[in-house]
Image (tube, grey):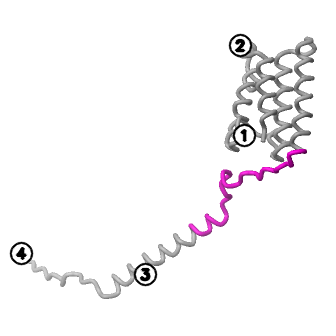
Amino acid sequence: MVTTVTLQAPFEYSWWVPILGLFLLAGAGVCIFFFATALKKYLPERKKNNLPKVRSLSPQELFALKRKYEGQLQGLLNTYASNQIEKREAYQDLSMLIREFVHDATGIHVENYTVKEIRSLGIRRLDMLMDEYYVPEFAEEFRAKHKDFNVSCNTALGVIRTWS
């Protein structure tokens, strides 16, 4: 039995197929552009661009502020020396005193900032102060044993006196 097969002509693309492909690519490009624009518009800005503004004080105001906090620091040191408070509580008070001073001097509410956020502010010598009180304030007793509260207070006093 003999069968015959007739073949069709090969499939040929018409002129409309490449044009349709170009329209599809252009449409995808436009969609991507609008999506990226919408993302940029509605996503929040990064925090590093939103650094708080630092308030500047007159020399007289800064001098009075330094004297106020020097007195408070000396009072805290005397309270600790007379064994009225424990070491951890003294470091907690020192932490709060330093944070209040920075707030009053700069206008930045560092009372609620983490260590990382305070370091990102770039305030000179503040991170050194935080190293003084952070471990004794929050760590276990044995990790804070090597810290001397008098030295920490003197370091804080030096930073307050040289604040500009």
- The answer to whether 61 appears left or right of 115 in the picture is right
Q: Disc 2 or disc 3, which is closer to the eye?
A: 2
Q: Disc 4 or disc 1, which is closer to the eye?
A: 1
Q: Would you name the residue on which mark 3 appears?
A: 23
Q: Would you name the residue on which mark 4 appears?
A: 1
Q: Image quadrant for the C terminus?
A: top right
Q: How many tags in the picture?
A: 4
Q: Which residues are magenta?
A: 36-60
Badge 1 amino acid: Ile
Q: Is residue 82 above or below residue 11?
A: above
Location of residue 141 (image quadrant): top right
Q: Image quadrant for the N terminus?
A: bottom left
Is disc 4 in contact with disc 1, using a CB cutoff of under 8 Å?
no
Q: Disc 3 or disc 4, which is closer to the eye?
A: 3
The label number, if any, that marks residue 159 in the structure image: none
Using the numbered discs, state the Cα–Cα distance from disc 2 to disc 1 in whole angstroms: 25 Å
**SS at mark 3?**
helix
Q: Is residue 33 above or below residue 108?
A: below
| In front of the other: 26 or 50 | 50
Badge 3 amino acid: Phe
Badge 4 amino acid: Met
